[in-house]
Amino acid sequence: MLIIGGIASAIGVAIALAIDWFPPQATEEAHKIDTLYDVLLIFSVPVFVLVVVVVLFSVWKFRMRPGQELQDGPPIHGSTTLEIVWTAVPAIVITGLAIYAYAVLHDIEKAKANTLEIGVTGQQFTWSFQYQAGGKTINSPQLYLPDHRPVRLKIKAVDVIHSFWVPAFRLKKDAVPGITTDVRFTPKTLGAYPVVCAELCGIGHATMRQTAHVISPTAFAAWLKQKQAPPVAAGGTSAGGGNAAGKAVFASAGCGACHTLADAASNGTIGPDLDKVLKGQDDTFIRTSIVSPDAEIAQGFPKGVMPGNFEKTLSKDEIDALVDYLAQVTK
Ligand code: CUA
């Protein structure tokens, strides 16, 4: 039994380590988490495999044979030695793993110089991100991070519990109404990574997705500067005939994730098809639909799915440009 268990455990560990479990490592902390995960696999897979082998072996070895129907098994009064062993070994293993896991966590959460602090707000059903620049709070519907600079996110929730999760960063933390939670990490790979809500938070939970963009420090500085002084909506026409600033807002606010709009080449189906529901509508209707989405709901769509905070996360100029753009391309 021990030989079979040993061989099965070795095969189990080999398979567990061979599987590519995670997305690319986009932070400096990611490889520590992945190593921790591998060590946990090395310890936990044999436990699972050994238990299964003992159960299957016993079922086969001690099965009831013809003529034994009325017999009882031998009386067993327990074994003190065995009980000490099976209590002490797991206790030592678990204590060791807990100490190791604590050391990894402690290392990851260490405060670092030149840390960039960014606010994260979770609400039904979107994330928004707050930056401090030039004495002002700048709201962004997408997360932008400079490469290789330590970041500390301060996470809040305004309604129910959400969970901020970026799989490529290997971090996840609950966003809880009434308290601020935080995570620290240092992005190390340029790219765009999904931000996901990992706590069932209502009907739109699955749509609570944004993107974390890791960009160069120069690009980040330029982005933050541009955010401080949003371009005026006037002037500039996009290829589709709508105003270019509005089209940019449509893209950056993530509207296309839920809505179909031919001019923006988006094909989301969570919310109404804008080419249809906005056709022939005036600016007032379009504006109301953006800032108070529940005022009038398109047939067949539930209330409360579209975030009601665009008046806060977008500037007045951005909303003006977006309304103008939508009116033009859905005429
Ligand atoms: Cu927010 Cu799920």
Image (cartoon, grey):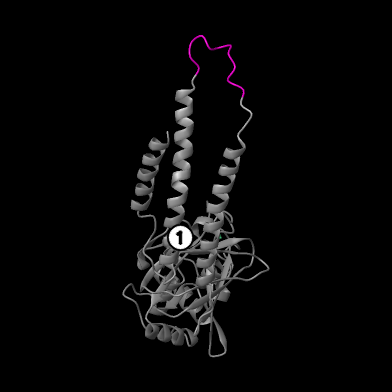
Would residue 286 be seen by someone viewing this image from the given angle?
Answer: yes
Left or right? Give the position of 6 relative to 111: left
Please state which of residues 8 and 20 is positioned toward the viewer in this rendering.
8
- Amino acid on which the number 1 mark rests in the picture: Leu
Most distant residue in the left direction: 239
Q: Is residue 69 magenta?
A: yes
Q: Secondary structure at mark 1?
A: helix
Q: Residue at x 49, y 72 (%)?
A: 141
Q: Which residues are magenta?
A: 64-75
Q: Residue at x 44, y 46 (%)?
A: 45
Q: How many residues crowd around disc 1 within 10 Å: few (fewer than 14), some, or many (20 or more)?
A: some
Most distant residue in the right direction: 178
Instruction: Specify the principal SS of the magenta part.
Output: loop
Please state which of residues 81 and 13 is positioned toward the viewer in this rendering.
81
Q: Which residue is mark 1?
A: 36
Q: Position of residue 126 (x, y in %)?
A: 53, 65
